[in-house]
Image (tube, grey):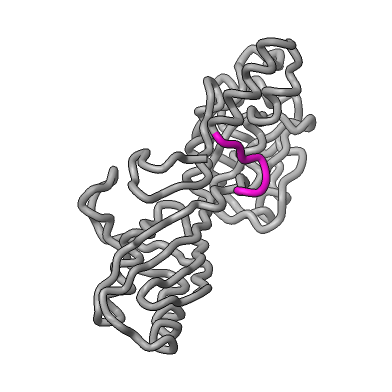
Amino acid sequence: MRPRGWGNPRVTGVLPIALEEAAKVVQALLLTGKEYVGVLRLHGDVPFERVKAVFREFQGPIYQRPPLRSSVKRRVRVRRIYYLDLLEVNGRNVLFKVGCEGGTYVRKLCGDIGEALGCSAHMQELRRTRAGPFTEDERCVTLHDVYYLYSRWKESGDEAYVRRFILPMEYALKLLPKVYIRDSAVAAICHGANLAAPGVLSLETGIKPDDIVAIFTQKEEAVALAKVLTSTEGAVQMDHGFVAKVQRVLMSRDLYPKMW
């Protein structure tokens, strides 16, 4: 959970935190979608049907320039709004739920909706209910929970307490397409080699060139993040050449023996 007042005022909800070597998977989390529930405050009176119609206009790809107070370069970019549901309107307060591509600024989205309505608007409240595979209802704890569970672990030595809020880094990769490789190829990738066709054991369907994928062992261990150079169909037909270019090695290079 994210306490009120951390970085973004009036924002709470799910905040995945990576520890030690698992910080390498943050790159993958940035690519995954987010879901928010928020309150948009209109600066004028607008008929319900008009608000509903404008909400529909903001679904799909939209152009967005990051706000002045942002951590990225302020250039216009395209972000996809998967769904934008109007839940309730109470006076000038609009309760909504939005599922969006990573890197979407919901505060800016609220301002843009206000401009489209002709009355201006701002984001009053926001709660992140999902970040990639992490949801508010599953695998989410408060800082008070962390303190309590950590204390119980220190007292009893029972790791079950900390396992309630510390997960394997593989969990963060649940939504990425996966490529499974032979054990004989693991060490080479951990030492910086790209993934060649003979090392591929299987891969998920629907993978397209330039997609970011997670490379896994047969035992469901995360090895690396990579950008694929071909589609699923193309990789299946290859018997030589490179299938993917490794972007980030996740596994320790000494875990599997060298096979060259």
Q: Position of residue 63 (x, y in %)?
A: 33, 67
> Which image quarter is the C terminus in?
top right
**Residue name at image x 69 percent, y 30 percent:** 164
Q: Position of residue 30 (x, y in %)?
A: 47, 44
- The magenta segment is 136-142
Between 96 and 105, the one nearer to me in the picture = 96
Residue 144 location, quadrant: top right
**Residue name at image x 49 percent, y 71 percent:** 84
Q: Position of residue 75 (x, y in %)?
A: 24, 56
Q: Main secondary structure of the magenta part?
A: loop
The reply to whether the magenta stretch includes residue 137 is yes
Between 29 and 192, the one nearer to me in the picture = 29
Q: Is residue 66 left or right of residue 132?
A: left
The reply to whether the magenta stretch includes residue 94 is no
> Looking at the image, can residue 229 be seen?
no
Q: Is residue 55 left or right of residue 137?
A: left
